[in-house]
Every structure is written in C-alpha cells, then in structure tokens.
Image: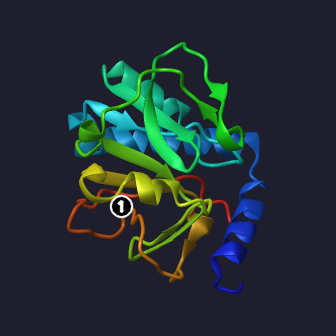
Amino acid sequence: MDGTKPLIRQEMRRRRRTLTAVELDAAERMVAASAAQLEEFRAASVILAYAATDHEVPCGALIEAAFAQSKRVFLPRLRGDRMSFAEYRRGTELRPGAMGIPEPLGDELEVSVVAGALAFVPLVAWDATGSRVGRGGGHYDRAFTGPTRPQCLVGLGYTFQQHAALPRDRGTSVSTGSSPSAKPCAAGTGTTRPT
C-alpha cells in the first residue's frame, strides 16, 4: 500500500467496514475491560470519548463503565472546524451533527478541564511511535494543542490498523508514543481478526 494518508484512510476504512456486528460487539467489550484496568481511567473524573461511526471501535460499554463509576462523560461537538466537548448524560439522546456524527446537547466542557481528562480517540491508523492518522479534518489535532491537551490520550483501533511507520506531521500522538505534554497510556485495540 502507498504510504500516503489519503490512501491509508481509504484502505483502513474499507477493512473496518468488513467487520461483523459480532466483531464490533467483541471489540467494544474488550475496550471497556481494558480501560477499566487503566489506573488513569480509575483516577479520572472526566472522560472524553466519542460516538462511533463508520465501524470505529464502539465506545458504548466504555461510556457505561464511566457512568458506573460516577464519571462525567463528554463527546465531541463540531462547529465549523472547531471541536469542543459537550457533556453526555446517560439516557439522553444524541443528535446528528457535522458530518452526520452524533453529538450531545449538553453543556460544553471548560477548556481548562480538558487538560485533566482522560481522552479516548478513534484511530484510522497508528504506529509504534504514537503517530496517528484520523479522518483527515485535523479536529483532534486543533482541539488538543498546548494547554488543552489531555494528560492522557488512548487511541482506539483494531490491530489491522497498526502500521510499521506512518507519514508523520505535527499533530496528535496517541498513547503508544510519548510527548512532553501528555504521558503515555496503554493503547486500546479491538478485534484481532486479520482482513
């Protein structure tokens, strides 16, 4: 496969779309169980997660585990090219937002609180250095710069999305790499089905 980001995105999305409902359910449960083992998860009072679309690793069980431990959960909300995080409460509906991604209607998280949160981010691809490829809009990169970078980022993806090396540019690294402003955490991966 050519190493350009657009081609990587295309191929990884194609492979994700071959996952069955059973495999998605298994990945969701595995991620929730793995997160519960993280000291950072147990210690966090605020969790940043996402509403999975396009066969991303589902976060529903992870979010329920956070609620069971009385944590506040925030999901992304887009306004133009700006991503913020709005509170999601158990039982409340999400509404279609930008790009058709479900968004919460709750209050926006104060920027100062983001730095202390544990953030789970979707991956299209990643490598051992912590480089990640997302959807391509740069929303997480812009949202998590400087003082608004969470203390811990955990990328969620499937094992087939891991690459030996990715094209690298400035942006959001995930939990497999280190950064002066974000300590590394254990990476969350879903199903290991080779496709």
Position in image of residue 144 (x %, y %): 37, 54
Residue displayed at 64% across by 32% down: 102
Considering the image in quadrants, where does the N terminus appear? bottom right
Number of on-image labels: 1
Position in image of residue 168 (x %, y %): 47, 80
Residue 195 can be seen in this image: no
Image quarter of residue 171? bottom left
Element carrying mark 1: loop
Residue displayed at 61% across by 17% down: 93
Residue displayed at 66% across by 60% down: 193
Position in image of residue 132 (x %, y %): 49, 68
Q: Which amino acid type is marked by label 1?
A: Ser
Question: Which one is in front, 174 or 65?
Answer: 174
- Mark 1 = which residue? 175
Taking the image as shown, residue 80 lies to the left or right of residue 144, namely right
Residue displayed at 34% across by 57% down: 186
Residue with the most extreme top position: 91
Image quarter of residue 79? top right
